[in-house]
Amino acid sequence: MGPLQRTRAGGARPVGLLSAVLVGLLAGGMVLIEVVLLPFWRSVPPEDFRRWFTANAPRIRALMVPLGAAAGAASVATAAVEASVSRRPGPASLTAAAATVGVVAVTVTVNEPANARFTGGSLTDAETRDLLGTWARWHHLRVGLGIVAAVAAAAALGRRP
């Protein structure tokens, strides 16, 4: 390993650690939504849910969107740094990056548009229940991907190029 590769290798650990922390926080936030908020949302009448969601979604979004973006960037950066050192990132880093990008993709294409509809003021109670069911199914996928990403990012810390 030449001097440049040693420098890159030394930089891989901090980026990998940052990725593991951010992805772990993202997964933890999604699990919290899964086990605390989602059951609450489903337990209240749709009108009360929409009112609660409209009042509180901006705070949740202000935390989760930047966290998701940072976790996605850090996990992709970890795989890229590993690739620059060894010409091939490890499978754990690739898994973490792919799963985190999957979380972001589902969020952007499904959950965020649904969130906008919940706060838009035009849903009936039946539409709210149906949309919350769809939102929940996709959120279950996000939680699964987030857990896979967190485990993989942590495992990647043990692999050094």
Image: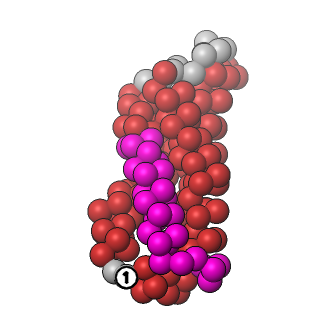
Dominant secondary structure (helix, strand or loop) of the stretch shown in magenta: helix
Question: Quick check: 103 left or right of 45?
Answer: right
User: Which residue matches tag 1?
Assistant: 45
Which of the 4 image quarters holds residue 129? bottom left
Residue at image position (49%, 29%) is 95
Q: Nearer the viewer, residue 126 or 152?
A: 126
Q: Is residue 108 magenta?
A: no
The residue depicted at 59 percent of the width and 25 percent of the height is 82
Check the image and tell me how it is coloured: secondary structure
Residue at 38%, 31% in the rendered image = 155
SS assignment at label 1: loop
Please state the horizontal and vertical placement of residue 113, each as a whole percent of the image: 64, 62
Q: Is residue 77 above or below residue 38?
A: above
Q: Quadrant of the N terminus?
A: top right
**Which residue shows up at 62% across the image and 37% down it?**
76
- x and y percentages locating residue 13 in the rendered image: 51, 36
User: Seen in the image, is 54 located left or right of residue 149?
Assistant: right
Rendered view: 83 above or below 138: above
User: Few, some or many C-alpha atoms within 10 Å of disc 1 (few <14, some 14-19, many ≥20)?
Assistant: few
The reply, left or right, for residue 70 in relation to residue 27 is right
The x and y percentages for residue 26 are 46, 55
Identify the amino acid type marked 1: Pro
